Image: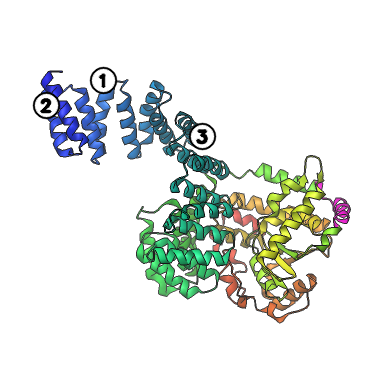
Amino acid sequence: MSESTDRDLQQALGVHKAKRYTEAEAMYRDILAEDPDHLEAAFMLGILAAQTDREDLAVELLAPVIERDPQNMAALKWLSGVLEFQGRHAEAEPYALRAVELNPEDYDALLKLATAYFGQSKFESAGEVFVRAIKANRTRMDAYFGLATAFLRLGDPYRARDVLRDAARIQPSPESILKLGEICLACEEPQEAILCAQGVLSRNAKDVSALVLLARAYRNAQMESQEDEALEKLRAVSPDDQLGHTLYGRRLQSLGLFQEAEAEFRRSVELRPNQGVGYYGITAGRRISEADRELVTQMEESVGTGEMNQDERAHLHFALGKAYDNLGQYGDAMAHFDEGNRLMRELRMGTRRFDREEAAAHVDRIIELFTKEFLEIQAAKMSANSALRPTPIFIAGIMRSGTTLAEQILSCHPEVGGGGEQGFWRPAEADCVNFEKGGVYRDTIKTKAKEYVDLLAKIAPGHEYVTDKNPANRMVYGLLHLAFPTSRIIHMRRNPADVAISIYTTLIRTGAPFVGDRDDIVFALKEHERLVEHWKEVLPEDRLLEVVYESLVKDREQETRRIVEFCGLPWSDACLHPEDNLRTVVTPSFWQVRQPVYTGSLERWRKYEPWLGVFGELTGV
């Protein structure tokens, strides 16, 4: 390199550093015109092309630099980065890998290699390299966030949560704390999400993202007054926040204020037309009719925009599925439900799959341990728990079997408070039951029972009885009977084909791992039936009542009287009008339970008969 060329390069580098990109590019090109083999000028021109959004030119310039200088660490990292930005992750991988081989401790090279793996859905490999990047530099957050996302794609939100806890501890920035809060919601741990949001708001009371997280967390925790306060603050701080209108619409829906809710969803769509959640809110709040064809057209146009994230797209497909269902276009509806389920299952489960073998084995363990004799012996030793108040009434069954309707009926009774879905007993099973040794820990069960009734007393103060309608409790009926030997369990049964269709056509964000896959749903329903038959054989007849959903909606008064009598309650006419129940409903059945009890959902599977597939096994036809 001549002295003049070196001087020209240094001058170009100074101009480049000052972000006078057009001038710098001309100077680099002058150098290359004089010396076409000038590596550094070509390299810097490639960087400048990337910085000025000309990625194809950047690749064209950087690739020859690496061919001539394979050890050029900076060029390797820049080229892999540009290719990843373009979504060309497979092409980026070898350049990033070569950079890591040159310097195995280089944080940026490791981050680019992990990103290349991630972009190809090689999530395990990406996770391993993100861990190496964290070890190389524990203070930079990108690798923590990447590792957490890799765990999410592998269907392990709890490991993702642990990673983000580390990130928030090392660098407690609003970004890291809010990411932790988001993942806590995915782990169904709203209390920790509340703490995360409050932590950010303690520094900046007007942080919109923190207010959004707080409102969502309070909703998940069923803390209604606090949710209202958070929404009020959000609307005051950012009245035109699109997500704020969506969250407020959801709150209004849960209160049965459907027209007001739709106005909020429409405002959200007005602020951001290409979305899914707002449209989903509109369609979920009422029946869609021919008068709504323009709305359906808008949604169809939004599907093809490509401007939404995966969660938004899933919501939009479920919204279109609901609309076409209401319009009687069942083939179109099922096509959208298929895509909505695919997207939502991928979000919830990542690459993880429902372990059918383990699910069946766990049912085997339950049946083997909780025999009639075992329950009689253990329940007799637990009778002291009968004094605990309030007395829980458990309402369970497979999801979409009518548990919300049953709870609405019972919580109309003046002595009964509605407890909603409490995720207490299924996790407690691990502490209370030892399947390997074939026994239970009675002292632990007593402690858990006291904690549980204290929780119910806070949720529905002043009531002698409080319901818990968590469908997952169907797995622990034996444990519930030991914890509360005098409590009643109402088991809801519904035509399994209708259950399958209802599960598949309902957007379910968290919960059971079989949701979203037709074969898994059928398998889970068959295992559910096997376990329920066992509970019916071993639990006392005066403690377990099976209520058939179809009978409840066809002969409402007779079945309602049977439920009330079974619970040991005096009759109340209010139980015949669950649609008048003013309590908040946050399950997907929020619209149906506000309507008079009707038979329109019976044998719904027949509408989808040509598209049932494996669900046909459940029809008995």
Does any portion of residue 335 appear in the rendered image? no
Q: Residue 33 carries which label?
A: 2
Q: In this view, does 517 lie above or below 414?
A: above
Rendered location of residue 258, percent (x, y): 50, 73
Q: Name the residue under label 1.
A: 68
The answer to which of marks 1 and 2 sits earlier in the sequence is: 2
Name the outermost residue toward the top.
2
Is 378 a magenta residue? yes
340, 466: nearer the viewer: 466
Instruction: Judge whether 485 appears above or below 116 on screen.
Output: below
Q: In this view, does 555 lie to the left or right of 487?
A: left
Kind of residue sitting beneath label 2:
Ala
Between the C-alphas of marks 3 and 2, the distance is 46 Å
Question: Residue most toward the bottom?
Answer: 573
- The span shown in magenta is 369-382
How many angstroms separate mark 3 from mark 1 (CA)? 33 Å
Q: How many labels does the image show?
A: 3
Label 1 is placed on what type of residue? Answer: Arg
Residue 263 drawn at (x, y percent) = 42, 72
Residue appearing at x 56%, y 64% in the figure: 588
| Residue placed under numbered mark 3 in the picture | 124
First along the sequence among labels 3 and 1: 1
Assign a secondary structure to mark 2.
Answer: helix
